[in-house]
Image (cartoon, grey):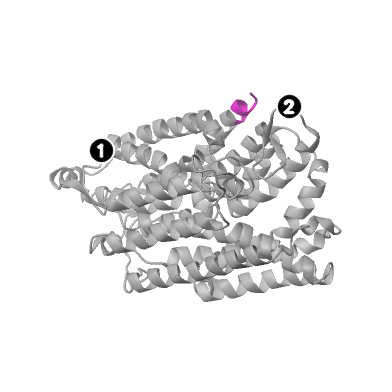
Amino acid sequence: MSSSHNERTVPQTAHTHAPANVGRLGWAAILAGAIGVAWLIGHHLTTASPGAEGPHAYAVPAMWACAPFVAMLLSIAIFPLVPAVAGWWDSNRNRLCVALGLGAVTLLYYLLHGGLSRAVGTLEQAIVVEYLPFIILLFSLYVISGGISVQGDLPAHPATNTAFLGIGSVLASLIGTTGASMLLIRPLLHANSERRRVVHTVIFFIVLVSNIGGSLLPTGDPPLFVGYLRGVPFLWTLRLFPEWLVTCGLLLVVYYIWDSLAWRHEERKDIAADESQRTPLRVRGCVNLLWLLGVVLCVGLVNPETELIGLGFRPFPFLREMVMLLLVALSLRTTPAGAREANRFNYHAILEVAALFVGIFLCMQVPIEILTEKGDKLGLTRPVDYFWATGALSSFLDNAPTYAVFFSAAEAVSRSATEGVLNLIGGGHILENLLAGVSLGAVFMGSMTYIGNGPNFMVRSIAQQAGVRMPSFFGYMVYSIGILIPIFLLVTSLLVR
């Protein structure tokens, strides 16, 4: 945890992505999404679902069939760290090839062990039911929040930085960890541009804004939206408020003390420069706040499994996704010129997520099916079991599929329960305390490494481009283990309630 002047170097510019053709790419993505949604609506309205019986009407897959899922997650974890393949892996086209290849292997397994109907049913479950709503939500939050530009230069006092992190922790649940991270990381770095000791600020930002802050709504973090797609009511996650409040509060206190000590050791000339260069914050593209609110309301109110409040009819499939794409189109149309360019906005990060997750959602069907059938035999029976088991995997694997796997395990354990259960929209139930353990483990421990959650690497990259010398993969873990494990042990005690 060095506090030397080497924390900041000359800003890197070689890997910045120009915001050229932002409009064309955005409109092309919306058009492609709209065509896909229209086709899927027609498919649902004119044909019976080939996966109506579900893959569970067949024999449970063998354990070795999880190999594509394991290979997919190991690719995400290891390829960026191996110099020989890191450059090749940086291409979204190559990521997509790996994802589709491993996904095709999974579909081939279902074809050979259940026939065409089972393969098609699995494909529909993975892509139509789970992946498409997931990626359209992330795309909507990413593009709309990218049109809000926060500029200015405040004095980087410990109180100022703590306020940034606190506000980001709240925004993360409302506009998503990705949206809040992209909105606030650049103004925070700009405010601290005269300071030398900045690494700890970026690390706490990743922990709070890119992960733990997004615990209160399904729009906050991808794992919670996966739960929403699986029938968890939209407002159920507010039940996690005590754990969110205690964890965020403790982290903000620790950060304030840490940053106060770092502030005292800054060079006087750097402090003087920071104090003299003040520019009030100016926000451009505020109209996008309206479109972000529209996305949140859309997710909460437009659900094909329930009637629209006050209207007395059930939304047709993918109406929610169509409305979100419409809000993205309105954002691209109404955002003031230059706002996205000021954010250096581009589509690279969301295309990376789209490329990787199409493979993840296909490959994870096997372990989910196995855990759904055999999850009650894993020996996980308490909330703390699910918190640490889900969290341990979420630290090194992406937390959204990890959540899905342990959600299925908890659902299997809950099958015979009659008390303390949450009725899922669309049928079935799950023990609430087990669901709390899964949710908190996935969201909280996604912050343990750079690869636990999508925004982590994005924030690290932006900080490095700003000249901050971020720690290595294992160097980051020295920080995260020292800071977070004691606090997570306290969260464990809260779970027993």
385 vs 370, left or right, is: left
Residue beneath the point at 33% across and 74% down: 21
Which of these two is toward me, 495 or 149? 149
Instruction: Please tell me whether residue 200 is drawn above or below residue 119 in the rendered image.
Output: above
> Label 2 vs label 1: CA separation?
50 Å
> Amino acid under label 1?
His
Q: Name the residue under label 1.
A: 157
**Mark 2 or 1, nearer chain start:** 1
Q: How many marks?
A: 2
| Percent position of residue 62, x then y | 84, 60
Disc 1: CA contacts within 10 A as few (<14), some (14-19) or many (>=20): some
Magenta stretch, main secondary structure, is helix
Which of these two is toward me, 44 or 226? 44
111 vs 191, left or right, is: right
| Percent position of residue 464, x then y | 37, 59
Q: Can residue 73 be seen in this view?
A: no
> Amino acid under label 2?
Glu
Instruction: Please tell me whether residue 248 is drawn above or below residue 358 in the rendered image.
Output: above
- Quadrant assignment, res 37: bottom right
Disc 2 versus disc 1: nearer the observer: 2
Q: Do the residues labelled 2 and 1 touch (CB within 8 Å)?
A: no
Q: Mark 2 points at which residue?
A: 419
| Percent position of residue 221, x then y | 51, 47
Element type at marker 1? loop
Give the magenta range. 492-497
Residue beneath the point at 38% across and 50% down: 292
